[in-house]
Image (spheres, coloured by chain):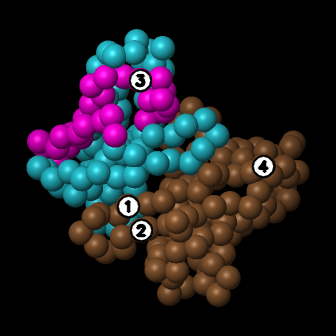
Chain colours: A cyan, B brown
Amino acid sequence: NAGVTQTPKFRILKIGQSMTLQCTQDMNHNYMYWYRQDPGMGLKLIYYSVGAGITDKGEVPNGYNVSRSTTEDFPLRLELAAPSQTSVYFCASSGNTDTQYFGPGTRLTVL
Amino acid sequence: GESVGLHLPTLSVQEGDNSIINCAYSNSASDYFIWYKQESGKGPQFIIDIRSNMDKRQGQRVTVLLNKTVKHLSLQIAATQPGDSAVYFCAENLSPGGNAGNMLTFGGGTRLMVKP
């Protein structure tokens, strides 16, 4: 199993641009999550999904959107990038246990 | 609001010594806690977890202790090695067994530096 994979690894955006961060897991996990991690800080939950077709807001959802059309994929969309969205983004998934497994992250810079 | 936090932002230890990383939590309703290790440029990696019906759990070279009376969690690493150098996060489950999945609240992290 590849686990949780994320693309791209790095991205630089201009203010106002849009992009989609991709996340895929091959563990058949129902639960998937998106977090952001600012420098020297812990992770904050942006959105999560408990299964295909179901998504809900986390702690910091403003400026982001998600979709969950399949069990495997959980893309995160930034419509109008702002400097405050400069961060490292982690996707995670979990199955029947509480343990979340994380992807390698996407480092995003908005200039 | 209630949150998970850490006492020490940086911990420096000699190779071979034992390390203890501490975490305070304030949500008395939390019943599940996890320790993650995050190496530079990588995602958090699960180390060990513990449920509130336990006060101690051991893994390979790691032990987690839970003191519900004072809402304190600690991670002990035996015979610390250079490969243990990383940032360690504790996290609590805000919705154990609920319909919201397994939402976690993370503390700010402690950086462990192992001196050879």
A40 left or right of A73 in image:
right
Please tell me how many numbered marks the rendered image carries: 4
Which residue is at 31% across, 22% downward?
A: A80
Q: Does the magenta stretch include residue B90?
A: no
Query: Is B58 located above or below residue A15 in the figure?
Result: below
Instruction: Please identify the quadrant where the C terminus of chain B is shown.
Output: top right
Q: Tell me the CA gap for discs 3 and 4.
A: 31 Å
Q: Name the residue under label 2.
A: B94
Q: Which chain carries label 1?
A: B
Q: Tell me the CA gap for discs 3 and 1.
A: 26 Å
Q: What residue type is labelled 2?
A: Leu
Q: Quadrant of residue B19?
A: bottom right
Q: Are marks 2 and 1 in contact (CB under 8 Å)?
A: yes
Which residue is at 30% across, 36% downward?
A: A64
At numbered mark 1, what does the secondary structure look like: helix, strand or loop? loop
Q: Which amino acid does label 4 sit on?
A: Thr
Q: Which amino acid does label 1 sit on?
A: Met
> x, y percentage for residue A6?
35, 32
> x, y percentage for residue A73?
21, 39
Q: Which amino acid does label 3 sit on?
A: Ala
Query: Magenta part of the protein: which range?
Result: A62-89
Q: Mark 1 points at which residue?
A: B103
Give the mark nearer the N terminus: 4 vs 1: 4
Local packing at callout 4 (Cα closer than 10 Å; few below 14, some 14-19, many 20+) is few
Q: Mark 3 points at which residue?
A: A82
Residue B81 seen from this side:
no
Q: Mark 4 points at which residue?
A: B10
Q: Does the magenta stretch include residue A67?
A: yes
Q: Mark 4 lies on which chain?
A: B
Q: Are marks 4 and 2 in contact (CB under 8 Å)?
A: no
Query: Is A67 located above or below residue B56 in the figure?
Result: above
At numbered mark 2, what does the secondary structure look like: helix, strand or loop? loop
